[in-house]
Amino acid sequence: MTNQRIALVTGANRGIGKEVARQLARDHGVKVLLGSRNLDKGHRAADEIGYGVEALQLDVSNPDSVAAAFILKIEPSYGRLDILVNNAGVDYDTDQQAHCADLHRVRRAFDTNLFGAWDTIIAATPLLRRGESARIVNVSSGSGALSDMSGGTAGYGVSKAALNALTIKTAAELKHEGILVNAVCPGWVATDMGGGGRPVSEGARGVVWAATLPNNGPTGGFFRDGAPIEW
């Protein structure tokens, strides 16, 4: 057991998730569990970050993997969770349009982008209830914002819109318990998925902001760089 705050960051062996793990550990003294589908890649990322970051095998698209991570590792080792960052996301499908999309591919995207986050929230909530100033951050995207949605990114955009809806519902249900739940768009960043944009460290900063909000902070919102954006 540890007196440090405990955070789980999913999909964290690279990109935004890895940088979120780094900033939480380095700048906020958080004990970070770095979720990775491939444990070897997770160990390499954790070793590179340092600061006590620990790799954890976790494929959020596989309910058995989610259950094992919580039942076999997080619960017995730590007994609680203070921060959950649902970062794992797949298939920024700029090559697809909704009216002719490959729905097998879309379903695979939903398994990670929506149902993976949902499954992880369900597994994490009992431990978050034991945590201190517990926070859930769903890493979303402007592609899922209905306010200016257009064509393209059929699976990714619709799955992120659904993740936003899940954020609103979860925030409303857990507000009375002091668990703050928000969605964050990191913006267009230079990751393997994004392919360009601003530095990863800048995109990650807004996620870390939401993960470390004070008790009087907002809940049920959609943010970029700490400022509200339209759903």
Image: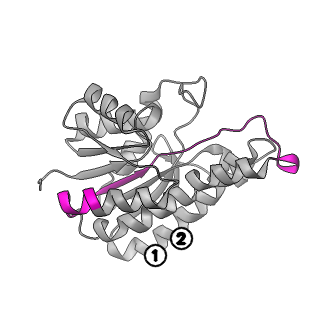
Q: Is residue 152 left or right of residue 193?
A: right
Give amino acid for label 1. Glu
Instruction: Give the quarter of the figure containing the N terminus.
Output: bottom left
Of 223 and 163, nearer the camera is: 163
Mark 1 secondary-structure assignment? helix
* Total marks in image: 2
Determine if the magenta segment contains residue 92: yes
Mark 2–mark 1 distance (CA, rounded to whole Å):
6 Å
Asked if the residues shown at circle 2 and circle 1 are in contact, with their CB atoms under 8 angstroms apart, the answer is: yes
Taking the spot 40% from the left edge, 35% from the top edge, the residue there is 13
In the figure, 55 relative to 212: above or below?
above
Which one is nearer the viewer's eye here, 153 or 199? 153
Instruction: Please give the label number shown on residue 173.
Output: 1
- Is residue 157 inside the magenta stretch? no
Badge 2 amino acid: Lys
Quadrant in the rendering for residue 28: top left
What residue lies at 36% left-to-right and 64% top-to-bottom? 124
Identify the residue at horizontal 23%, vertical 34% (top origin).
Answer: 26
Above or below for 68 versus 85: below
For disc 1, the neighbor class at 10 Å (few under 14, some 14 to 19, many from 20) is few
Find disc 2 in the rendering and name its residue. 169
Which segment did they paint magenta? 72-101
Pointer 2: residues within 10 angstroms few (<14), some, or many (20+)?
few
Residue at x 71%, y 47% (from the top left corner): 105
Identify the colour scheme used: one colour
Q: Can the viewer see residue 17? A: yes
Residue 203: % across, % down: 47, 34
Q: Position of residue 202 (x, y in %)?
A: 44, 30
Q: Position of residue 63 (x, y in %)?
A: 48, 61
Q: Secondary structure at mark 2?
A: helix
Q: Position of residue 214 (x, y in %)?
A: 29, 56
Residue projecting furthest to the right: 99
